[in-house]
Image: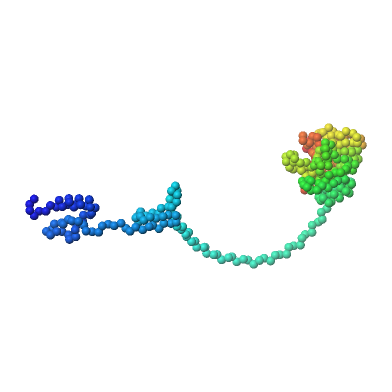
Amino acid sequence: MPAGMTRPHSTLHHGARAAVFGLVLLVPAHGGAAPGGRMDVGWSNAPRWRLPRERPPECPRGYAGGLVQVSKARCIGQGPKSQPDPEPPRPAREPPREEPPPRRPAPERPPPLVPEEPPPPRERPAARPPPPLAGGWPDATALMAMGPARCHDYLREHEVPFAALPAGEAPEVAIPVRLKGPVAGVTFTIPWSNDPERDHHAIWDCRLVAAFVPFARWLAARGITEVQYFSALRRGKIVRDKPRSQHNTGLALDLYALRQGGDAAATVEDHYPRRELRRCPAPGQAGPGAAPPAGAPMSDIYLALVCLAAERGLVHTLLTPDHDRAHANHLHLDLKPGQTSPVDPFISFHGL
């Protein structure tokens, strides 16, 4: 190489090698270019790059911080190693405050009205009792209007032996009583009852007993000494199946048979003539249902008994074997509340 020439390539190669092994940055030296316009390449005397100062992060409760770089600072959860690090709780944000709506002025209240004096009550005309029937017997609606005290007095006036029962013995009956002897000489019995003093079928409503006082006197005049019946009050399955039955409240009687003196009992099933009574005859007329003469057969007494109830309104309902198959062996007689007077009873005549 000619004299006076420099070897820049060697110098640069030597400087690059020094930068790799010495981890220094090759930068132009202070002072700029060398005399003569040449670039003077040397070691940099600039200050080294330093990491920022280390500081612990601000950690919430349950976390620990270490002296780590600021850019990598994090909080380490303290707890069992098997559990993941819990997330740090976030600061709760306060809900925005809603301004209350403007208050509306309260409406002005009208002045209180001065109550007018009520008109004087109108005088209602006194309720007239229904006209008494022949013999002075009240009809079924008049009997249903009686309370306990009046009904008990009614039975005593007509010499009916009875015992008033406490409400707990028959709570479904308004005025429960038991017969303690014959009514007008006629005994009312349940022939198959083993204990009539305890049998609930022998519990009557007092008003039903009152309704049978004229029946008993009419039957006694014709030689009848015993009336056999199925039940007055009835409980159990039939009550659930027929909730409208008056047996539910002791206001119905199923008449099974009649007996004259020492004769055998004449049952409805065997002695009631079916498909004969289409209507009751007028007073004084002959025919089915007319008043039977002395010694008349039991079939005539049964038909006349039905017409007696129909003409005098002694019951509200009377169902005969002509009504349906369920009544083939008895007569059903009942009282109902809320009926009009004079009574127009429902009688199951043949063909109606």
Percent of width and height locating residue 171: 77, 47
Residue at the right extreme, as displayed: 294
Tell me if 109 is positioned left or right of 147 in this view. left
Q: Residue at x 33, y 59 (%)?
A: 53
Residue at the front extreme, as displayed: 80
Percent of width and height locating residue 185: 90, 41
Q: Residue at x 79, y 57 (%)?
A: 124
Question: Along the line of sight, which residue is nearer the eye, 157 or 340?
Answer: 157
Q: Quadrant of residue 294?
A: top right
Q: Residue at x 43, y 54 (%)?
A: 63
Number of numbered callouts drawn: 0
Q: Determine whether 243 is above or below 38 in the image.
A: above
Question: Along the line of sight, which residue is nearer the eye, 154 or 169?
Answer: 169
Q: Name the image quarter holding the C terminus.
A: top right
Q: Tell me if I can see residue 31 in this picture.
A: yes
Percent of width and height locating residue 22: 23, 52
Q: Residue at x 21, y 58 (%)?
A: 45
Tell me if 79 is positioned left or right of 231 in this view. left
Percent of width and height locating residue 226: 87, 38
Tell me if 167 is positioned left or right of 262 in this view. left
Q: Quadrant of residue 299?
A: top right
Residue at the left extreme, as displayed: 2
Tell me which colouring the rendered structure shows: rainbow
Tell me if 296 is positioned left or right of 230 in this view. right
Q: Tell me if I can see residue 217 in this picture.
A: no
Q: Determine whether 114 is above or below 298 in the image.
A: below
